[in-house]
Amino acid sequence: QVQLVESGGGLVQAGGSLRLSCAASGLTFSAYMMGWFRQAPGKEREFVTAIDRSAGTAYYADSVKGRFTISRDNAKNTVYLQMNSLKPEDTAVYYCAADRYGNSGTYSRGDRYDYWGQGTQVTVSS
């Protein structure tokens, strides 16, 4: 059974930081592009960031570029999202996703990802 489990969400003040983790099991982690998406109440799920298999290339939504950093540790089967300078607009449920067939042209498309975590809530107060 493939499982992605997010952790690290919580309540933080604007300008603060959080680090999310996503632990994967049941798959060959290094064979998957890993991504983070988020969904705020009343909003569609949106792409946040993704990282390729070898961690050589990362992609970011314009809204988080310069503030968020994605990383992965293939030895630990874990992908991370370091979130700095948080804004109230970042409030959302954050989802980890795995894409076996991801490429530079489809990394931001949620429908291309094969597995999803249950999500972790991030709330940023003003």
Image (spheres, grey):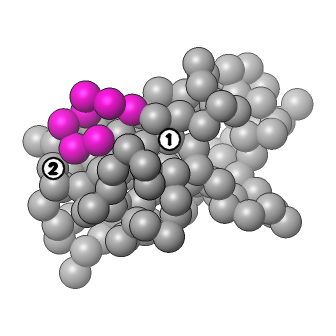
Which of 21 and 72 lies nearest the eye of the viewer?
Answer: 72
Look at the image and tell me in which quarter the N terminus lies: bottom left
Which of 3 and 101 lies nearest the eye of the viewer?
Answer: 101
Visible in this render: residue 80? yes
Q: Residue at x 52, y 63 (%)?
A: 110
Q: Which mark is residue 116?
A: none
Spot occupied by residue 10 in the image (x, y as percentages of width and height): 63, 45
Query: Which quadrant holds residue 123?
Result: top right
Q: Is residue 54 magenta?
A: yes
Circle 1: element type: strand
Magenta highlight range = 52-58
Q: Residue at x 11, y 42 (%)?
A: 75
Q: Which residue is mark 1?
A: 49
Q: Which badge, 2 or 1, comes first in the chain's sequence?
A: 2
- How many residues crowd mark 2 within 10 Å: few (<14), some (14–19), many (20+)? some
Q: Which mark is residue 30?
A: 2
Magenta part mainly helix, strand or loop?
A: loop
Quick one: which residue is furthest to the front in this view? Answer: 105
Q: Residue at x 25, y 33 (%)?
A: 55
Q: Residue at x 29, y 41 (%)?
A: 52
Query: Which quadrant holds residue 41?
Result: bottom right
Q: Is residue 95 left or right of residue 93?
A: left
Q: Is residue 36 left or right of residue 41?
A: left
State whether residue 49 is above or below residue 116: above
